[in-house]
């Protein structure tokens, strides 16, 4: 193993932006075993009287999701929301075309709201822009948000929910640029439909915030023209523009894969430029921000079609150490791009493309679960503009990439800070001097590290704690400097306490 030196310079006066709490969101879709057997499983001995899996709720609470997107995904583009409300024994059992599964509709909008309350998270609903009408989209807003006294609100009350659900965040469709999408549209068709839908939805409730569908990923042949076109049409009626991306290592190029942050940053930068261009072109005073409302590692090739069964096993990814280190970089990018990125939702929170797997009587946490848990609990206040000086790792994909990927936060109100460092090298340890430039009295309160020697190492039902974030002895501070040893293939987190003054 080779040894290298690095410096990480932190200064609470050198900030990027306030970190939007909504960067730590999740996504649940009627796909595979995410809803059924993941969140809702009345048959399980671990479920409560509402049929919600209590062990899953506890695991999600620990991860502190701030917002939860629902009900899809590709599913939403064929979904009639009326199928999922009202008496359960009258809900239709349907062929679900997006994932070729059977949908029982035993879980719908009101059950989702109860789930959000149970884990104390904000709901974010997507409306159907595939087979759905702009009228049905506005009706759902009224059903969810209006006080009783009109048709749809009264129907909600009749279904047992007199009080409005007050859903603030609304996605106007899902991945409408994709030919795989039910009711796929081109950018002009979608822009026009989204504009009219968002208008009606906002007339139904002027307090809502809407999300326009952006490109499904940066490899789409229509990227980034789709984004520019749809934004130019719908700009004044939307508040966020969505990004989706699934990362992977299909070529088994671990060095390149471990530099994925470079790709994530480029994707944000292109769309940030697009937002600026459209704002200028429209001579607008209105701002639109980015919502990365589907992100995750997904490439291992599990089936995607359910053979017309209920809750089939679809896209149940097994995640290893290198996947966890990519997730850590992704979260670092969210902090580094916090001036333009305001919402992010990991897809998905349980079973489907997820770091959490259920069996009827148990739960397995995969390594990246712990990465998200740490960042989501600790990144508060403002993101810091960290200067990291580290040697490079050579990659075929991106050329030289810095060995360390670093982000940090500082909350003036509490004096709490956090530093998140990935060592992406597979064979070099780094001794890093972390220097708090504006405050020599800062203290490291706690430290954690997730690390291993094999990038392909995983947690299993028999060895569930193989890769977890282990507590470290808090590194000693000496006049504002802490020296850390960062092993190869590691993610290290520091929590700092009061002392870091804004001067
Ligand atoms: O999250 C799984 C699927 O990935 C979603 O349904 C779709 O939006 C994306 O292609």
Image (cartoon, rainbow, N blue to C red):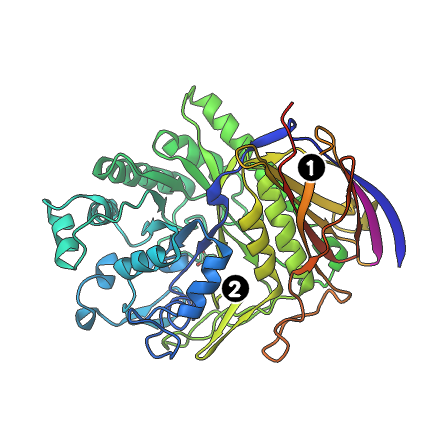
Mark 2–mark 1 Cα distance, whole angstroms, equals: 36 Å
**Residue reaching furthest to the top:** 283
Magenta segment main secondary structure: strand
Q: Position of residue 96 (x, y in %)?
A: 33, 67
Q: Residue at x 37, y 33 (%)?
A: 234
Q: Is residue 374 visible?
A: yes
Q: Position of residue 460 (x, y in %)?
A: 61, 76
Q: Position of residue 212 (x, y in %)?
A: 40, 41
Looking at the image, residue 332 sits to the left or right of residue 258; the answer is left
Looking at the rendered structure, which numbered label has been put on residue 442?
1
Looking at the image, residue 470 sits to the left or right of residue 307; the answer is right
Q: Residue at x 59, y 69 (%)?
A: 318
Q: Which residue is mark 2?
A: 354
- Mark 2 and mark 1 residues within 8 Å of each other at the beta carbon: no
Q: Earlier in the sequence, mark 2 or mark 1?
A: 2
Q: Would you place residue 254 above or below residue 216 in this image?
A: below
Q: Which of the pair 403/482 is nearer the observer?
A: 482
Q: Residue at x 78, y 65 (%)?
A: 453
Q: Would you place residue 171 above or below residue 76 in this image?
A: above
Residue 428 within the magenta-colored segment of the rendering: yes
Q: How many marks?
A: 2
Image quadrant occupied by the N terminus: bottom right
Q: Which residues are magenta?
A: 427-433
Q: Residues within 10 Å of mark 1 (few under 14, many from 20)?
A: many
Q: Residue at x 76, y 67 (%)?
A: 454
Q: Position of residue 316 (x, y in %)?
A: 52, 70
Q: Is residue 80 visible?
A: no
Q: Which of the pair 329/127 is nearer the observer?
A: 329
Ligand 1 has an atom within 8 Å of the beta carbon of the residue at disc 1: no
């Amino acid at each position: 193993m080779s040894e290298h030196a690095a410096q990480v310079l932190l200064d609470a006066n050198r900030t990027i932006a306030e970190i939007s709490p909504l960067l730590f969101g999740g996504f649940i879709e009627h796909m595979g075993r995410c809803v059924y057997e993941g969140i809702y499983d009345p048959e399980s001995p671990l479920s409560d009287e509402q049929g919600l899996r209590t062990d899953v709720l506890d695991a999600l609470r620990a991860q502190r999701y701030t917002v939860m997107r629902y009900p899809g995904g590709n599913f939403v583009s064929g979904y009639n929301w009326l199928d999922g409300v009202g008496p359960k024994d009258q809900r239709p059992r349907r062929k679900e075309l997006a994932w070729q599964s059977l949908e029982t509709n035993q879980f719908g909008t009101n059950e989702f709201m109860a789930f959000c309350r149970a884990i104390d998270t904000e709901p974010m609903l997507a409306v159907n822009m595939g087979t759905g009408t702009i009228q049905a989209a506005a009706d759902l807003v009224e059903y969810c948000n209006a006080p009783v006294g009109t048709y749809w609100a009264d129907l909600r009350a009749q279904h047992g929910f007199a009080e409005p659900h007050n859903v603030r965040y609304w996605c106007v469709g899902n991945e409408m640029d994709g030919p795989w999408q039910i009711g796929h549209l081109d950018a002009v068709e979608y822009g026009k439909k989204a504009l009219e839908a968002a208008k009606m939805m906002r007339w139904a409730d002027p307090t809502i915030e809407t999300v326009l569908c952006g490109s499904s990923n940066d490899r789409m042949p229509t990227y980034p023209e789709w984004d520019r076109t749809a934004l130019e049409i719908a700009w004044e009626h939307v508040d966020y523009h969505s990004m989706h991306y699934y990362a992977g290592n299909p070529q088994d190029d671990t060095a390149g894969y471990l530099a994925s942050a470079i790709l994530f940053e480029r994707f944000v930068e292109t769309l940030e430029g697009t937002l600026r261009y459209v704002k200028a072109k429209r001579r607008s005073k209105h701002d639109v921000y980015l919502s990365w409302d589907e992100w995750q590692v997904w490439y291992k090739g599990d089936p995607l079609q359910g053979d017309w069964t209920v809750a089939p096993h679809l896209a149940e990814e097994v995640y290893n150490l290198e996947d966890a280190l990519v997730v850590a970089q992704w979260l670092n990018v969210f902090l580094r791009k916090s001036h333009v990125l305001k919402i992010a939702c990991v897809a998905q929170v349980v079973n489907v493309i997820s770091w959490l797997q259920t069996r009827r009587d148990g739960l397995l946490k995969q390594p990246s679960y712990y990465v998200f848990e740490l960042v989501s609990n600790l990144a508060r206040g403002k993101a810091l503009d960290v200067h990291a000086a580290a040697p490079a790792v050579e990659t075929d994909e991106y050329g030289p990439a810095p060995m360390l990927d670093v982000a940090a936060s500082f909350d003036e109100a509490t004096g709490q800070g956090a530093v998140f460092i990935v060592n992406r090298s597979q064979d070099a340890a780094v001794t890093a001097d972390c220097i708090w430039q504006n405050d020599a009295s800062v203290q490291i309160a706690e430290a954690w590290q997730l690390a291993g020697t094999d990038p392909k190492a995983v947690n299993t039902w028999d060895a569930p704690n193989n890769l977890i974030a282990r507590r470290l002895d808090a590194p000693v501070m000496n006049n504002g400097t802490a020296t850390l040893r960062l092993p190869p293939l590691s993610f290290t987190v520091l929590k700092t306490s009061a002392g870091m003054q804004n001067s």
